[in-house]
Image (cartoon, rainbow, N blue to C red):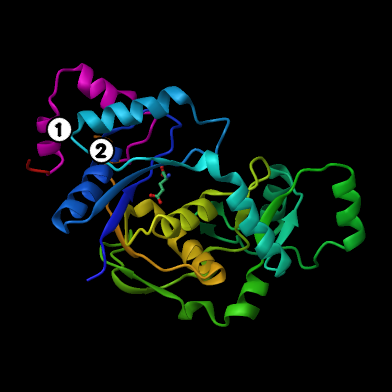
């Protein structure tokens, strides 16, 4: 039987909260049950929002929670050249294109679209321009030093991979609507998603997909808020020739108001839970982990 390898992959943009603890414990316990490996990965491509103090707190909070992970810990900010090389490869194959539009212009395009283009994993789906930008205009804008994002061209991807609904992944947990088993991806929810952000030249989607493959992750265990993003990851796996892990999405914890927990709910951070005197064992029990 092949090895079971899973990970917890937080972004150090704030303190971890109870929901993160649930996710981390789910992955850790699954690895333990399967006699497998548990890794921690720091997803810090957002160099403006990520802070060293949050990264330090992640280590402290997870150790307090009773988790152990392998060293060294992969930090995405140390691997930008690898992500950029993958984009170059996709660009050379004509699978991504430069998008110079500002957020405001994109919102205007969405408002002008005859039908609302719908919501995807990254918010409103980008209504692709009818015509690609001319080579002259592109050169002009590049020469002027204008910033651009790399967008996946679904049209080019379809030309290369064929009918995208034939791409599937195995869901051992469930999506937000109870989706489970063999799942066909939803290209209609993706649109020409950003693969390389204007500021850092990569994106969560690309970095997570490449790292899961590089680290030999066999099982991705994470919140169901990322279920639809898996469609993007599945396409990237096909384009880059990467293995497809098994996915186990889990429900998100909700607060007393029924809304999902977010980093801004200060009272629910592990830091404040620890400060209030609750023991790690008490918290684990509260979250359904009896050890
Ligand atoms: N870094 C992502 C987050 O903090 C999670 C990535 C993943 O598990 O795929 O939401």
Image vertical order of residue 113 relative to residue 104, above or below: below
Q: Which percent across, then down, holds residue 106?
A: 70, 50
Residue drawn at the location 30% of the way across and 43% of the way down? 70
Q: Which percent across, then down, holds residue 277?
A: 15, 18
Q: Is residue 219 magenta?
A: no
Image vertical order of residue 257 relative to residue 272, above or below: below
- Residue on which disc 2 sits: 21
On the rendered structure, is 18 left or right of 48? left
Q: Which percent across, then down, holds residue 243?
A: 43, 68
Q: Which residues are magenta?
A: 259-288
Q: Residues within 10 Å of mark 2 (few under 14, many from 20)?
A: many
Residue drawn at the location 67% of the way across and 73% of the way down? 156
Nearest to N terminus: mark 1 or mark 2: 2
- Residue on which disc 1 sits: 283
Residue drawn at the location 65% of the way across and 57% of the way down? 87
On the rendered structure, is 93 left or right of 180? right
**Secondary element at image label 2:** helix
Residue drawn at the location 27% of the way across and 28% of the way down? 61
Q: Which percent across, then down, holds residue 48?
A: 58, 30
- Disc 2 C-beta below 8 A from ligand 1: no
Placement of the C terminus among the 4 image quadrants: top left
**Secondary element at image label 1:** helix
To which quarter of the image does residue 1 belong? bottom left
Q: Is residue 260 magenta?
A: yes
Image vertical order of residue 259 relative to residue 193, above or below: above
- Label 1, label 2: how many angstroms apart (C-alpha)? 9 Å
| Contact (Cβ within 8 Å) of mark 1 with mark 2 | yes
């Amino acid at each position: 039987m092949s090895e079971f390898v899973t990970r917890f992959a937080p972004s150090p943009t704030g303190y971890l909260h109870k929901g993160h603890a649930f996710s981390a414990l789910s992955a850790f316990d699954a690895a333990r049950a399967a006699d497998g490996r548990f890794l921690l990965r720091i997803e810090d491509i957002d160099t403006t929002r990520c802070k060293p103090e949050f990264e330090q707190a992640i280590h402290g909070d997870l150790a307090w929670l009773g988790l152990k992970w392998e060293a060294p810990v992969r930090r995405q900010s140390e691997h930008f050249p690898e992500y950029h090389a993958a984009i170059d490869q996709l660009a050379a194959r004509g699978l991504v294109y430069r998008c110079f539009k500002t957020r405001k212009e994109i919102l205007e395009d969405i408002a002008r679209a005859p039908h609302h283009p719908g919501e995807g994993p990254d918010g409103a789906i980008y209504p692709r321009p009818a015509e690609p930008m001319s080579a002259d205009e592109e050169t002009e804008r590049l020469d002027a030093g204008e910033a651009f994002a790399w967008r996946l061209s679904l049209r080019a991807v379809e030309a290369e991979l064929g009918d995208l609904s034939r791409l599937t992944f195995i869901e051992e947990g469930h999506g937000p609507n109870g989706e489970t088993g063999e799942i066909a991806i939803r290209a209609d929810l993706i649109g020409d998603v950003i693969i390389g952000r204007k500021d850092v030249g990569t994106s969560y989607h690309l970095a997570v997909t490449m790292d899961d493959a590089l680290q030999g992750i066999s099982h991705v265990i994470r919140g169901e808020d990322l279920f639809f993003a898996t469609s993007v990851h599945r396409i990237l796996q096909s384009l880059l020739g990467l293995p497809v892990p098994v996915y186990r999405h889990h429900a998100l914890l909700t607060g007393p108001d029924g809304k999902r927990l977010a980093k801004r709910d200060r009272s629910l951070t592990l830091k404040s839970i620890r400060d209030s005197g609750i023991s790690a064992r008490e918290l684990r029990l509260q979250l359904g982990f009896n050890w």
